Amino acid sequence: MADLLELVDSRQIASGVHAIVLRRDEPLSEPVAPGTFLDVLCGTAATSLVLRRPLSIADASDDGREMTLILRVVGTGTAVLAGLPVGSRVDCLGPLGQPFRIESGVGRALLVGGGVGVPPLYLLGRRLVEAGVRVQFRLGFRDAADVFWTDRFADLGQVLVSTDDGSAGTRGTVADLEQDDAARDFAPEAVYACGPLPMLRYVQSRFAGEVPTQLSLEERMACGVGACYACVVQDARDADHQYRICWDGPVFDAQEVAL
Ligand SMILES: Cc1cc2nc3c(=O)[nH]c(=O)nc-3n(C[C@H](O)[C@H](O)[C@H](O)COP(=O)(O)OP(=O)(O)OC[C@H]3O[C@@H](n4cnc5c(N)ncnc54)[C@H](O)[C@@H]3O)c2cc1C
Ligand code: FES
């Protein structure tokens, strides 16, 4: 069932990137799990957008009443959402989806993110640190103007940044961060990733099979609740089966999916 959440904060945090905080009237019965998302109705009478837009939960208060979303403005829905005044009511479904799992017995976890795949890694990092896990973040952005929240990530663990043009951190992609001394010294016992497909393919081929690796996939969604099969990914072990990213995911074991 959809809830009308109150927009209690909205601010630009990087070029074309906004952080919004939504508050529900009642607390949630359990803490928000990392990797889950809200399916947000961005439409107004003026824009008449029908389909909801999935946005990862970047952070949440302990009682689940407040949730922070970080969104890049790429089209009408995200532009409407970024422009809403504080005090607006926003129609949201969720938290939805299968979350990242905290692997037991893991002491060091590597979290790899790119662009709008970076936000869910913040709540995941928080939960890992609360579980006593040491974390290293490898975060990829387009350029320095695109970089956000690295100070907050640094409160949780070590942060290595890459940008396409080298205007912040290492020039290149998150794969190039492997050459960094801090990366060489960090042998992960679990890997988590969220971001664009080429980045997920790199993480899959580099780490899956070696250490437990989980990937959060992004695909355009329609219903958001498993009914329409608009958001499928091929099952790596069964040619006749496809997973629905909104329902079976968005988080998958890296060896479950053919990218
Ligand atoms: C599980 C999940 C979590 C997500 N989390 C975030 C998040 O935390 N922050 C964030 O900024 N975005 C996130 N996204 C992407 C976000 O849902 C889309 O950017 C948004 O729906 C675009 O809506 P729009 O109306 O602004 O753009 P549209 O007008 O619908 O599209 C504008 C352009 O963006 C492309 N696009 C739209 N949706 C996607 C998509 N899912 N993947 C790739 N390209 C797309 C379109 O092809 C088009 O070129 C997530 C997507 C998924 C599936
Ligand atoms: S969006 Fe309808 S099944 Fe995933």
Image: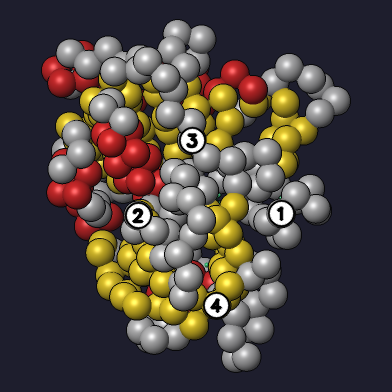
Q: Looking at the image, which residue sits at the far front?
A: 29
* Residue that label 1 marks: 225
* Residue that label 2 marks: 62
Check disc 4 and report its element: helix, strand or loop.
strand
- Residue 78, percent from left and from top: 48, 70
| Distance (Cα) linking label 4 and label 1 | 18 Å
Sequence order check, earlier mark of 4 and 2: 4
- Residue 213, percent from left and from top: 47, 21
Numbered label tally: 4
Sequence order check, earlier mark of 4 and 1: 4
Label 1 CA crowd tier, 10 Å (few <14, some 14–19, many 20+)? some
Quadrant for residue 130, please give it: top left
Amino acid residing under circle 2: Asp
Check disc 2 and report its element: helix, strand or loop.
loop
Q: Identify the mark at residue 4; answer none if there is no mark.
A: 4
| Distance (Cα) linking label 3 and label 1 | 18 Å
* Residue that label 3 marks: 100
Q: What's the residue at 41%, 72% (across, down)?
A: 23
**Quadrant, the C terminus:** top right
Q: Is residue 238 above or below residue 50?
A: above
Amino acid residing under circle 3: Phe
